[in-house]
Amino acid sequence: MSTKEMAYSIIDTLTEEQLEELMVFLKGYSKKTTSVDSVFGILSGRSNGDYISQEKSVWEKVAAENYEAP
């Protein structure tokens, strides 16, 4: 499956609200601004402060849930 086909299959599963958010994100994206800082800037408006404290341990938690023997 090509990257374009994968993108279309993902887009087909999105709700109308998610599509609108994706469009806002894509319209705000500029090929001139491809640095990590610019991506953080674009995404910062979508952040949820309630989850920031959980970010540090989420990888370990998910890895343990998915890969530890039962």
Image (tube, rainbow, N blue to C red):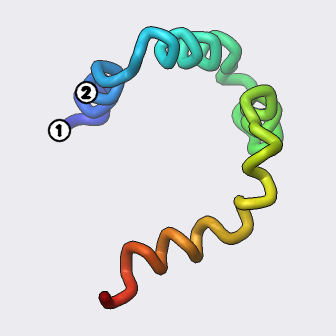
Query: Any mark on residue 9, and which?
Result: 2
Q: Which residue is at the front of the view, 11 or 2?
A: 11
Q: Is residue 69 above or below residue 7?
A: below
Secondary structure of the residue carrying tag 1 is loop
* Amino acid at the residue labelled 1: Met
Number of callouts in the render? 2
Identify the residue at horizontal 23%, vertical 28% (top origin): 5
Whole-percent x, y for residue 23 in the image: 55, 11
Whole-percent x, y for residue 6 in the image: 27, 33
| Image quarter in which the N terminus is found | top left
Secondary structure of the residue carrying tag 2 is helix
Query: Any mark on residue 1, and which?
Result: 1
Whole-percent x, y for residue 19 in the image: 47, 14
Apparent side of residue 48 relative to residue 69 in the rendered image (left or right)? right
Q: Which residue is at the front of the view, 6 or 56?
A: 56
Identify the residue at horizontal 79%, vertical 27% (top origin): 45
Splitting the image into 4 quarters, where does residue 10 fall? top left
* Amino acid at the residue labelled 2: Ser
Query: Residue at the bottom extreme?
Result: 69
